Image (cartoon, helix red, strand yellow):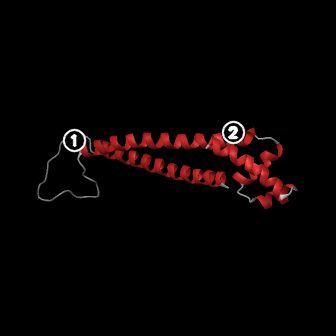
Amino acid sequence: MDCIKKYNDLLIEIDNQEYIVDGLEREKRYLEKMIFASGPKDITAINYDHGPTGSMDYTPFDVLLSRYEKVCARLEIEKSILKQKLEIRNKIFKNINRLKGLEYKVAYKKIVEGKDLSRIADELGYSVGYIKNISSKINKTFNEAV
């Protein structure tokens, strides 16, 4: 059961990491828009009677640029973390594919489909004890991989 918990935790971590990367990419696009919006404009008369009006964010260019650089740096780090997690998931699938016959079926049903051993035994027509023995071999294989 430990390998199933690790696998499910890994899938949750991958989903969370994808949300983090997506959020940083949206923030990067927003900052790019703000940086280009705060660029040089046509020279016009300035009215000092009132403060800035409108819905535009008047963040100074140097602050925007600093935030942009930090977001880009963090985005690269988060992408590399996501890449590592996806590689681990792929290693697990390679280990499943390395198994033959009944071991493959048990591993797939247990890890990917999340079924318990008694249900797997019923579906495959074997005793629960025999499926438990196969499952313990699979656990050793996956605990080494993860």
Placement of 12 over or under 101, stated as above or below: below
Specify the amino acid type for callout 1: Asp
Name the residue located 37 percent from the left edge and 44 percent from the top edge. Answer: 71
Placement of 141 over or under 5, stated as above or below: above
Task: Tell me where residue 132 appears, x and y as whole percent.
Answer: 78, 54
Mark 1–mark 2 Cα distance, whole angstroms, equals 60 Å
Q: With 127 as the anchor, is 17 left or right in this view?
A: left
Specify the amino acid type for callout 2: Lys
**Badge nearest the viewer, 1 or 2:** 2
Q: With 50 as the anchor, is 82 left or right in this view?
A: right
Name the residue located 69 percent from the left edge and 39 percent from the top edge. Answer: 94
Task: Tell me where residue 101 appears, x and y as whole percent.
Answer: 83, 43
Quarter residue 9 falls in: bottom right
Name the residue located 32 percent from the left edge and 47 percent from the top edge. Answer: 34
Number of numbered discs overlaid on the protein picture: 2
Q: Where does label 2 land, which residue?
A: 94
Foreground pick, 77 / 27: 77
Task: Tell me where residue 100 appears, x and y as whole percent.
Answer: 80, 41
Q: Where does label 1 land, which residue?
A: 42
Quarter residue 92 falls in: top right
- Element carrying mark 1: loop
- Element carrying mark 2: helix
- Outermost residue on the left side: it is 49
Placement of 80 over or under 15, stated as above or below: above
Q: Quadrant of the N terminus?
A: bottom right
Foreground pick, 46 / 71: 71
Task: Tell me where residue 22 appears, x and y as whole percent.
Answer: 48, 49
Quarter residue 67 falls in: top left
Q: With 88 as the anchor, is 130 left or right in this view?
A: right
| N-term-proximal mark, 1 vs 2 | 1
